[in-house]
Image (cartoon, grey):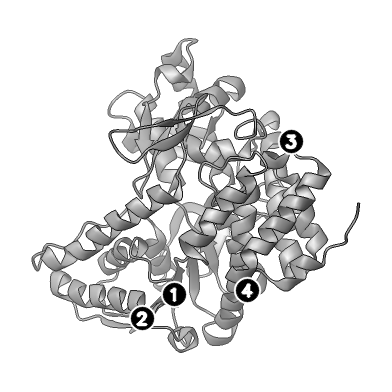
Amino acid sequence: MIRIVFLGASLNWVPRLLTDLLVVFPEPLAVWFVDLDPGAAEACRSWGEEANRVFGRRDEYRGGTDRQAALRGADAVLVTLSTGGFPAMALDLSIPEAFGLYATVGDTCGPSGWSRAIRNIPVFEAFADDFEALCPKAMIVNYSNPMAALTSVLLQRCGNPAVGLCHAVFETRDVLAALLPPGTPDGLQMEFVGMNHFTWVTGFTVDGENGYERLDRRLSGRSLLALLPEETEDEIGFSSGHRLCAELFDLYRCMPYPADRHTVEFLPWGTGPRAERRTTLHAGRIPYEELVRYRIRRTAIVHREAYRDLSLKAFRQIWDRKAGDPPPRSRETGADMIRAYLLDGVLVDAVNALNAGQAPQLAAGACVETLGVVDRTGVRPLPASPLPEPVAELVRPVALAQKWLVDGMLGRDPDLALQALRLEPQAAGLSCGEIRELYDALVAANRPFGAPAFLEGRRRTT
């Protein structure tokens, strides 16, 4: 019986990913849910037992806190956790804001993503050690942010086939399809390269025709904003506008990841002290802070809490489903990758993997996002078409900052971790003294959540 382990009993991720697994694996599975909160692990175990009734299956489910017992002999592992939860995330947002740096999401890059990484990387190091010792052939699928940094830790610290996955590619494809005449999406194929949440479409075709040429004909000299939908909703329910996407496309003639709420955090001009903000009501919901220029609504902790409540409601709905009426599968491809690896399949899809030449314009060894092949041998990223050189200049510091942070954490080098923070484009307007103050504040705030003590040992300079 194939054994699959969830590290992190997420009430958001477990229903969709487990449903996907049950769809692609008709054979019985043994599924373990591991979480520091035994109540969360038990809740997910109960969800699985109820799924047996709804799907008409006989899978085995266990839940608990013993990670090593669960991992011993596992065939695949899905990582769906966030160390420190909302209390830590609130500090990721508020501390940089005291320095004039405004995070719209705060889970991937900039000082907020840096902060999230320093408490999660030690956890992922421990995971990697366990994978190597207890399930060295298991496929590891990471859904936790910051995606690139944490996946990089796994790939450097254990020999398991591992991949980072994100639904950004679906959103990009949806937006591209919306720009083209009806009936074209089925024949749309994309190439892309960049960092997670900061990828760029280097080329796309529609039924074999150059997609950028077709798009140019539709635009007829107009801004991309003339064709873009006002906003789209991602796979987990957060909306994003596209004014920044249009501004970047009009300048570079290359399509960025269209979720402006993420993209703006990678740019030195997007979220700093000069970015005008206001508080707005959106569709009668909880008030949002909004960046005026791009109309980007900030995902604050209060919104994440509201979404958690919606996730809990959706989580409980399986008990109301009739047998033979299972929940629909998601568009996530983690289950398909696991099946391809375990059962001799082949799948080509977006992967986050260490740069071994597939993105030669970006730092070697950084974790980059491109197309890749998953089969019984593991994960193989495919060579990407080059970025326009001006776009590459935007992505290079992001890739290098991520690499320096991971190298600093794994090498126990606080000064390199500090330089990674200095390199973040979002922090470009801070003085060297302010960067050191921000570093110290973030390290101190993360100590209760597991940030290692060596980070406090950097060289003190005046």
How far is mark 3 from mark 4, CA to CA?
A: 32 Å
Q: Are marks 1 and 2 in contact (CB under 8 Å)?
A: yes
Mark 3 and mark 2 lie on one chain; the one further toward the N terminus is: 2
Q: Which residue is mark 4?
A: 125
* Percent x, y of residue 452: 69, 71
What is the secondary structure assignment of the residue under circle 3?
Answer: loop
Q: Which residue is mark 2?
A: 2
The amino acid pointed to by label 4 is Glu
The amino acid pointed to by label 3 is Gly
In the image, taking residue 45 as reference, residue 8 lies left or right, namely right
Give the camera-side residue of 130 and 185: 130
Q: Quadrant of residue 453?
A: bottom right
Give the camera-side residue of 461 and 208: 461
How far is mark 3 from mark 2, CA to CA?
A: 51 Å
Q: Nearer the viewer, mark 3 or mark 2?
A: 3
Mark 4 and mark 1 lie on one chain; the one further toward the N terminus is: 1
